Amino acid sequence: MVVYNLITIFASEKEIMMKYDILKLNNQLCFPIYVASREIIQGYNKYFGDLDITYPQYLVLMVLWEDGEMTVNNIGKRLHLDSGTLTPLLKRMEIKGLISRNRCRQDERTVRICLTDKGKQLKEEVVKIPPQLAEELTLSPEEIEVLKRLIHKLINKE
Amino acid sequence: MVVYNLITIFASEKEIMMKYDILKLNNQLCFPIYVASREIIQGYNKYFGDLDITYPQYLVLMVLWEDGEMTVNNIGKRLHLDSGTLTPLLKRMEIKGLISRNRCRQDERTVRICLTDKGKQLKEEVVKIPPQLAEELTLSPEEIEVLKRLIHKLINKE
DNA sequence: AGTTATTAAATTGTACACAACCAATTTTTT
DNA sequence: AAAAAATTGGTTGTGTACAATTTAATAACT
């Protein structure tokens, strides 16, 4: 079995991979991950409807619920997102009254993002969503653990 | 061990999950998949630079290389994308001279997408990319197979 | 002190995604 | 045949993503 990075190639009596077979959708690893990512976001958005938040906004709320106030930079490091994505996203969250944005007095370059009371309270509603999404999943607990481990290995390039 | 869909909860002597722990980034399955998806796209775009295509455009090319000409609808079914995404994307590809778009005479509702010679030739360049991306991956062949199987199970909700 | 380098956000421009809606064209039903 | 339903692709509006550039502020250096 020969492996070309994101694509697995079987060379056996049963299955011989030709030059262009690595370009077939079914042989790809990347494509199903890309589809899975979008399906997850759609799944969440289905439940977010009433709360008027999106999946990336939910991610921002999660890091703030976990770590309290943070700079834009640190949120970006945590979520692997840059300021071009975060600045307008955070402005929308500010308009909704979920967070506040203030320049630090110590270092005027950085902007401190804080949860408002409304943003803190949202946690009570959001915590109900994951169990609902759970109903739709068919992986066993063991499979989920394996999947998490492999995806982390893929990301971290360990 | 209790599982709430996309989040795994360990309840043991060593590790007790509290109510809000399901909202911690590290306990999530969805978030790393979301990150992995974006990293894959960035990885591809790095190599696409010279060819002037994007990852979703590469996906369209793949289904066309594989199945020949297709309707917009069928491309959407294959890639899990709707017309709101595909129509402008295909128009950009038409402008670049990679594909042609023509309404069918038999059924005026459908639009047939065909590869141009330029689109066909691009395959020769693109086939070199996956092996290059392979260099950056650290999963074993066996791990890739397991990951592919689990992701497919996640998507298909089998 | 004054210049240079670095850093943090914001801005700009392009390209997805997708929900919601629409128009045109079949297809089905009555 | 006429009316209703379904299908196909397009349009609109909002919200990410991200590369590349800009601006402002701080740190480092001669």
Image: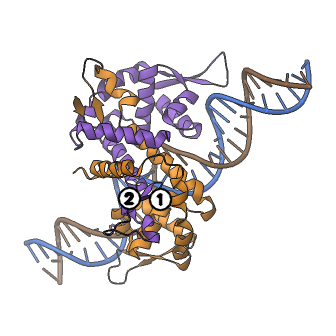
Chain colours: A purple, B orange, C blue, D brown
In the rendered image, residue A81, in percent from the top left (x then y), is placed at: 53, 38
Query: Which residue is more in the foreground, A25 or B70?
Result: A25
Q: Residues within 10 Å of mark 1 (few under 14, many from 20)?
A: some
**Chain of the residue where label 1 is placed in the rendered structure:** B
In the rendered image, residue A74, in percent from the top left (x then y), is placed at: 55, 27
**Chain of the residue where label 2 is placed in the rendered structure:** B
Identity of the amino acid at label 1?
Pro
Query: Which residue is more in the foreground, B135 or B7?
Result: B135
Q: Can you tell which mark lies on residue B81?
A: 2
Query: Which residue is more in the foreground, A10 or A120?
Result: A10
Residue to which mark 1 is pinned:
B56
Looking at the image, tell me whether mark 1 or mark 2 is earlier in sequence order: 1
Q: Is residue A57 visible?
A: yes
The answer to the question of whether label 1 and label 2 lie on touching residues, with beta carbons closer than 8 A, is yes
Q: Quadrant of the rendered structure where residue B47 is?
A: bottom right
Which of the two marks, 1 or 2, is nearer to us in this view? Answer: 1
In the rendered image, residue A31, in percent from the top left (x then y), is placed at: 41, 56
Instruction: Using the image, determine if residue A72 lies above or below residue B103.
Output: above
Task: Determine if marks 1 and 2 fall on one subunit.
Answer: yes
Identity of the amino acid at label 2?
Leu
